[in-house]
Amino acid sequence: MESTVLFKIEKGCIQYQNKRLFQELDFTIRQGETWALTGDSGSGKTSLLKAIAGHLPITGGKWEAPFFESFKMTRNIPEDPLFSWRNLVAFIDARHRFTNLSHTPTFYYQQRYNSCDAEDAPTVSEMLNQEASHPDWFGWTVENVIAVCRLEKLLDKQVILLSNGETRRLLIGLALLKNPVFLLMDNPTAGLDRLTRMEFEQLLAQIIASGIHVVLSLSHHELPASITHIAQLKNGRIQAISTWEQYQEVMEKKQTAGSHQLLLDDWLRLGHFAEFDEIVEIQNGCVQYGNRIILDNINWKIAKGERWSIRGHNGAGKSTLISLITGDNPQAYANNIKLFGRKRGSGESIWEIKKKIGFVSPELFQYFPQETTVAQAIESGFYDTIGLYRAPVVENEPLLLAVMNALGIGDYAKYRLQEVATSVQRLTLIARALVKYPPLLILDEPCQGLDPNQTERIKCLVDELCRQTHISLIYVSHYADEIPASVNRELVLEKGKLVTFQNS
């Protein structure tokens, strides 16, 4: 006897801004099932999640959400004519939607490093209490969420100051406080260190045990043991549906092979890298907000052509260390820092510093304006602005096209970022970091949200770039297999302290 159907789409069509994302779509979720959506970037995983959440319209065919009527019969549903099945679905997007204390989304990229501006952001405790009004149908109270999501030490911290991994834990906690029937998560392990990913698997098991049904998008090599069913997507279609056991059998037999023909040479021929013997030198580097020490006595030097990785747990201080180099942290002026052979604060402008650095990070992705086209976003790299605020330069077009082709996004030049897949947005920001031929390239979690083929492409590109030039590199990743072979030096942070420093 089949389990009760909770949500069902038959021959449905999903579209966004007159663009069809799915057609002839059949997808059913039954009682007791936990689903993972896998597939290459741009295959439709996020769109399907948004359709289930009610954020994208399902047209044609038919769809139904029978769980809503049965839930109303067994629970104390508010007497509200506007209360619908959508109120019983929580969706965790790749981007957060935090607002300031005035409930307006005015956060900006460097705000987390400016303590005065950060005070306009609510604390973790305030955010949790805002969601505490939901009935605890599945037992998720503020106290439970704080304990299970390990938020105790973050309660008094402004949300804008959270690390990428801490933000992810808070978003899961806020979603759980809604006590939804369905919890939908788009790539929930992105940016989490190895220990936190293991803790996420335990948390997922607790969520499912509480009675919440989970659907999440994940890379195929990160599927938790709690998953019961997998839908493999490709080009807006569900290519295959299998149980966990069936999927594991297929993956064991499947051998993946692929070549990554880089068009890097075309881009390299159009420009050159300025060279400096001294790239970065930090002596006794410290960053502190009130009584909270973020970085403690860091000494680090990078010379021309050195390729470094930075590792550390979520909240270890990696992003703050990078912000001292990029000029985004005002406490850089209180530290003894030399960039490209010149002492910081000796008369150079922040734009002179940024001109020599190519940079991408999860935070930059979070705050980059979505109405910008792919080509405009990349061209903004020449001026180090978050968005293009001047007319495009015709002479830049060959260079823009060359770097887009090197990253496999040449067909998206005229699309706005909000119209393309998350992976294309992330590749666009990598292209933005490269376009000006920077002597220092900083790639902070560059493969976050990319599929295995795109990740391999980035690794090959970085290795080839390091082979052909004297570029210096800082590379951050929680995944050892994402780090290019050309990276041969390592700095490890733990609670703001430098604990490992290796040259090889």
Image (cartoon, rainbow, N blue to C red):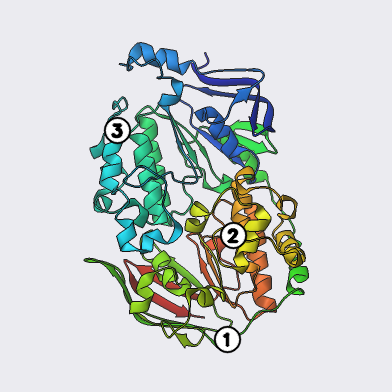
- Left or right for 285, reference 46: left
Residue 85 is situated, as x and y percent measured from the top left of the image, at 45, 21
Residue type for callout 2: Tyr
Which element type, helix, strand or loop, lies under badge 1? loop
Residue type for callout 1: Phe
Quadrant of the rendered image containing residue 37: top right
State the separation of the CA atoms marked 1 and 3: 55 Å
Residue type for callout 3: Trp
Which element type, helix, strand or loop, lies under badge 3? loop
- Left or right for 366, reference 460: left
View extreme (left): residue: 291
Q: Which mark is residue 389?
A: 2
View extreme (front): residue: 391
State the separation of the CA atoms marked 3 and 2: 45 Å
Camera-nearest label, 3 or 2: 2
Residue 369 is situated, as x and y percent measured from the top left of the image, at 54, 51
Q: Which residue is mark 3?
A: 140
Q: Earlier in the sequence, mark 2 or mark 1?
A: 1
In contact (CB < 8 Å): disc 2 and disc 1: no
- Left or right for 80, reference 339: left
Q: Earlier in the sequence, mark 3 or mark 2?
A: 3
Q: Which residue is mark 1?
A: 276
Q: Earlier in the sequence, mark 1 or mark 3?
A: 3
Residue at 47 percent across and 45 percent down: it is 188
Q: Residues within 10 Å of mark 3 (few under 14, many from 20)?
A: many
